[in-house]
Image (cartoon, rainbow, N blue to C red):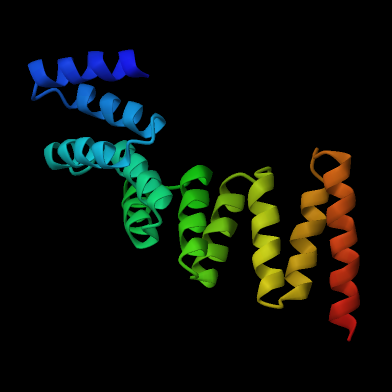
Amino acid sequence: LASAVGTLQRGSYELTDNMVIAHLLARVYIEDQRWDDAIEELDKVLEDNPENYDAFYDLGHVYFELGDYEGAISCFENVVAYKENNELIYYALAQAYEANNEIDKAISNYLKSIAVTDKFTLAYKKVGILFMARKDYEDAIEYFEDYVNFDIPQEEKDRVNKLIERIKGVSRK
């Protein structure tokens, strides 16, 4: 990483108008968890091209890592405006909403990620957990049952099946 940072910093210094280098440098900073440096480079990229959804996506992840969930949501919403029907973007947006305690919006975006790719196993598990947390047991069971039908490790299937049985017991009461 140190070599990549040095090379890209030199390129950025010598070619100040080259936003590809600035974006690559930002990604190396992200890999190295140099969040403030990454934000600075991504801001530069977005100032030059405010419709660069890749830069918004990267910036959203930086904000998420820093615990600025509203900033992450804003960035991911910008990405959705440019690039619809991408399960990974909806999933990232759902995680940011979940972390910001906006459960209904998180569920909505997890469901959108499933609508784009009905084989996106992580979204099934996450939406099941959120339905369970809000005591929508029937919906939680439905998504957990769908989840265990995927090719996941048997140990995980066993844990989730036990959870389904516990939920069924709670929902009967």
Judge left or right: residue 155 versus residue 72. Answer: right
Write the residue at 42% across / 48% down.
65
Q: Above or below — where is 54 with respect to 17? A: below
**In which quarter of the view is residue 6 placed?**
top left
Count the numbered circles shown: 0
In the displayed orientation, state which residue is furthest to the front: 2
Write the residue at 39% across / 59% down.
69
**In which quarter of the view is residue 128 placed?**
bottom right
Write the residue at 82% across / 46% down.
156
Write the residue at 45% across / 54% down.
93
Image quarter in which the N terminus is found: top left
**Residue 145 in the image, given as x and y percentages of width and height:** 82, 57
**In which quarter of the view is residue 54 placed?**
top left
**Residue 92 in the image, given as x and y percentages of width and height:** 48, 49
Residue 61 visible at all: yes
Judge left or right: residue 98 versus residue 57. Answer: right
Image quarter in which the C terminus is found: bottom right
Judge left or right: residue 154 versus residue 65. Answer: right
In the displayed orientation, state which residue is furthest to the bottom: 173
**Residue 38 in the image, given as x and y percentages of width and height:** 28, 37
Residue 15 visible at all: no
Q: Nearer the viewer, residue 59 or 83?
A: 59
